[in-house]
Image: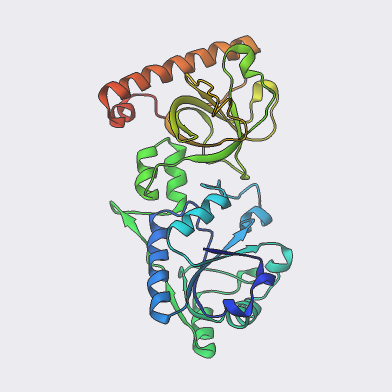
Amino acid sequence: MELIRGLHNIKPKHRGCVLTIGNFDGVHLGHQAVLARVREQAASYGVASAVMIFEPQPLELFAPEKAPARLCRWQDKFRLLSDNGIDRVLLTQFNQRFANLTAEQFIEDVLVAKLGVKLLVVGDDFRFGKGRTGDFKLLQRAGEHFGFTVIDTASYRTEEIRVSSTAIRSALATADFAAAERMLGRPFAFTGRVRHGAKRGRTIGFPTANIALQRLHSPLHGVYMVNVEAAGKLYDGVANIGRKPTVAGEKELLEVHIFDFEATPELPDLYGQTLHVTPLVWLRDEKKFADFAALQAQINEDAATARALFTAMHDDSSCETLRAKQYNK
């Protein structure tokens, strides 16, 4: 799959495509249904399938405090779009200059002149252009004038529930990971590279792998029982997602303690390794403790709880046992 970074990098060879535009946060089953339609239409037109996404997402520029939590980093989104067979991703920098394009300028300069769109697939509630004046009907009229077709994305439903990034965030907020998985088509997980931290955890017997979340807001907060994939191996563990209030942390961080991790010559430590962290069960909210000793006592309790749950899971070989226990919010 080809990545085009910015409108200025669109070349004449990129003209002619079937395009869809959106945030595609999580690339869930609803998105996947849209992408399948884009691929089919592109094949019928004999042109490339293309997706336009924005960095940052519009609300992150205009109202960062109201911006929704991201389900995945843009790198993960790129990989998922590639997995869904898309030919090109146009990563558009959403800045004030781009936001000031009128709806008409966006249609004529970007969709027609630069991309030569043959067919556009967007939601019927899609709004664009300065002041959000552009809508689905304007696109249809423009399509009739410039010779491209516009079709809407039908809502994808599973078990009579509309699949959306918002619905997935709601499921995650209540630690309903089974519902999130049904809508995503895969378990929800964080992916990231382990970086050096303050190394306080090792002083109390709980070394942690620290991973930057690389998003404005996290969809999860608190302490969770997790599975961790590192260098092709699967481990059990416990993770904290938050700002570490006991030590006056400022940025949201994912801290993972892996149970029974043993260094090997091939993997002497986790620094620089990319981890895939899958939350399984919510254990508690993050909170500020009176001192480090109180924090250590709580971490011991969290680890004991998680180990007991893992024992139950491995004995029963069914995650449904875990989900039935009273550790969910």
**Point 62% across, 9% down: residue:** 293
Residue 36 seen in render: yes
Residue 289 seen in render: no
Q: Nearer the viewer, residue 71 or 40?
A: 40
**Point 28% across, 51% down: residue:** 159
Q: Position of residue 127 (x, y in %)?
A: 55, 69
Q: Nearer the viewer, residue 221 or 45?
A: 45
Residue 47 lies, with reference to residue 5, above or below; the image says below
Q: Could you tell whether 273 is left or right of 29 in the image?
A: right
Q: Position of residue 27 (x, y in %)?
A: 46, 55
Furthest toward the right, the residue is: 97
Number of residue marks: 0
Q: Could you tell whether 94 is left or right of 226 in the image?
A: right
In the picture, the quarter occupied by the C terminus is top left
Color style of the picture: rainbow
Residue 46 lies, with reference to residue 92, above or below; the image says below
Residue 233 lies, with reference to residue 288, above or below; the image says below
Residue 287 lies, with reference to residue 71, above or below; the image says above
Q: Quadrant of residue 235?
A: top left
Q: Could you tell whether 291 is left or right of 17 in the image?
A: right
**Point 42% across, 72% down: residue:** 152
Q: Position of residue 81 (x, y in %)?
A: 48, 58
Furthest toward the front, the residue is: 265
**Point 49% across, 79% down: residue:** 137
Furthest toward the left, the residue is: 316
Q: Nearer the viewer, residue 66 or 253?
A: 253
Q: Position of residue 264 (x, y in %)?
A: 53, 23
